Amino acid sequence: MNAPIRSLLLCSRPPWPPIGGDRLRTSQLARVLAGLGPVHLVATGDDAAPASHPFASVRLVRPSRASTALGLVRGMARGRSLQESLYDTGEVRRAVAAALAGGIDVVVAHLLRTVPWLPEAGPPVIVCLQDALCAQAREATSHGGGADWRRLALRFDRGRLEAAERRALGRADGVTFITARDRDLVLAGAQVRHAVVPAAVVPAAVEHVRDEPAEPRPDSIVFAGNLRTASNRDMALHLVHEVLPRVRRQRPNATLDLVGVEAPPVVRALDSEPGVRVVGRVQDMAATLAEAWVTACPLRFGSGVQNKVLESFAAGTPVVGTARVAASLSASPPSGLLVGALDEPFAAQLVRVLGDRELRDRQGRAGIRFVREQHAFPTTFDPLVGLIRDVIRAR
C-alpha cells in the first residue's frame, strides 16, 4: 500500500467555481491530489472557498496594487515575461514558504506564472505547463484582428515566454502538457529532449456525459468559449464575417449564438449582425450545447485542446472544426468532428449537418463515445499520478 503523499497545489486563481479551462483543470487536479493524501492550496485571489473543498489548508493571497506594480517592474527589469511578473509578489512567495514549512512531499505548480513563487530548493516540483504559450503568442500575433492591447502584449512577450518556458523546465522535476503537440512544441523550442526532464501528457478530462443526443433547435449553431482570449475572439469574428453569411445563403434561417464570459466590445458589437446573438455567460453550458444543432470551432491559431469541443461531444452535439482542432485531440479526426478548411468547405460542412438530422445524431453519439473512451475523469490524470510517484522516488 502506498504511503500518503502530502502535496501543495499552486494556482493563479482559486479552483472554484470550476468554470473555464484553468479553473476546471485545477479543480480536477485538486481532487486527484486529494486521492493521494492531504493537499494544500496557495492561490492568488480573494474568492471565498466553498464549504465543500478537498484541501487540508487554503491560503488565498490578494496582493496589493503596490506589490503587483513592484513585481511587474522588477520582473520586466530582469527580462521576465508578463506571465511571470504580473503574479510574482512578496505576499505570495511568503504564503508558499509558510505552506512548505508544514511538510510537503511534492509541489504541483499550475501554469508558467506560478513557477517564480517557488524557492530555489525544496521538495520535488511538477510544473503543469498545459499549453505551449510561446507558440500561441507567435501565432496570435501573426494573424489579423487589430492591434489591441492584448495583441501588443503578446507581441512584446513572446520572446520572453520562450525563456520562461526554459526556466520552468530547468526548475521542474517533472512537467505535464495537455497534448503531445504542446509537449513537442515546448521541448523543441527549449532545445531539450524528453529524457532531460520527465514529461507526461495529461489530456483534458470530461466528467458529465449524456447518454444520447438531445432534441436540438433547428438551424442553430453555437460557438462557446472565453470571448476575451485572442484565439476565441478571432474565431467569433471569423464565424460572423466569413462563415455565417455563406451558410445563410443556403439556409437563411441559420442562427449563431456566441456563448461565453468576458466578451469584449468588438465581440458584443456582433449582436447587430444578421442571425447573430451574443449570449455571454450561461448558467448551464452543457444544456446550452446539448440543445444546439451543431457547434462551430474555426480555430486558426493556438495550441492546447479545445475544451469547448470536448464539452460539445459530451453533450451529444457534433462539432465542425478545422484540421487544427482535429490535430489537438487524441484521435485525428475523432468521431463526432466534421473537418472543414476555412471558409467555403467549413460553411459547407455546417450546411450539411444542419440539413441532416440523422447525420447530426449519428455524429453526436460518436462524440459521446469518444469522450468516454479518451477523456474520462479521473483516468486521464493517471500519467500525472505516475509522474508524481516517480519524482518522489527519484528524490
Image (tube, rainbow, N blue to C red):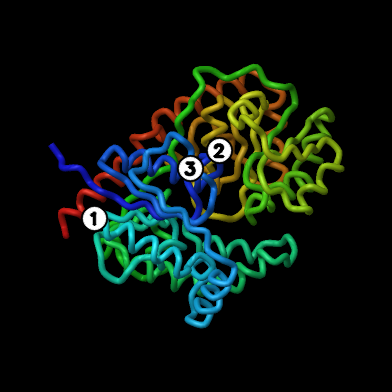
**Is the residue 235 above or below the residue 62 in the image?**
above
The spot of residue 202 in percent (x, y) is 37, 46
CA distance separating discs 3 and 1: 23 Å
Tell me whether the residue at label 1 lies in contact with that at label 2, contact meaning CB atoms closer than 8 angstroms.
no
- The quadrant in which residue 382 appears is top left
* Nearest-to-viewer mark from 2 and 3: 3
User: Which of the two labelled residues, at mark 3 and mark 1, occupies the earlier sequence position?
Assistant: 3
The spot of residue 163 in percent (x, y) is 44, 73
User: Which of the two labelled residues, at mark 2 and mark 3, occupies the earlier sequence position?
Assistant: 3
* Nearest-to-viewer mark from 1 and 2: 1
Q: Residue at x 62, y 36 (%)?
A: 320
Q: Which residue is mark 3?
A: 49
Local crowd size for mark 2, using a 10 Å CA cut-off: few (<14), some (14–19), many (≥20) = many
**Left or right of residue 199: residue 48:** right
Quadrant (top left, top right, bottom left, bottom right) of the N terminus: top left
**Is the residue 131 above or below the residue 259 in the image?**
below
Q: Residue at x 26, y 69 (%)?
A: 121
Residue nearer the viewer, 2 or 67 = 67
Local crowd size for mark 1, using a 10 Å CA cut-off: few (<14), some (14–19), many (≥20) = few
Quadrant (top left, top right, bottom left, bottom right) of the C terminus: bottom left
Q: Which residue is mark 1?
A: 103
Tell me whether the residue at label 2 lies in contact with that at label 3, contact meaning CB atoms closer than 8 angstroms.
no
Q: Amino acid at mark 2?
A: Val
**Is the residue 73 above or below the residue 340 in the image?**
below
Q: Which residue is mark 2?
A: 309
CA distance separating discs 2 and 3: 29 Å
CA distance separating discs 1 and 2: 40 Å
Tell me whether the residue at label 3 lies in contact with that at label 1, contact meaning CB atoms closer than 8 angstroms.
no
The spot of residue 247 in percent (x, y) is 77, 36
Residue nearer the viewer, 207 or 43 = 43
The spot of residue 218 in percent (x, y) is 74, 22
Q: Amino acid at mark 1?
A: Gly
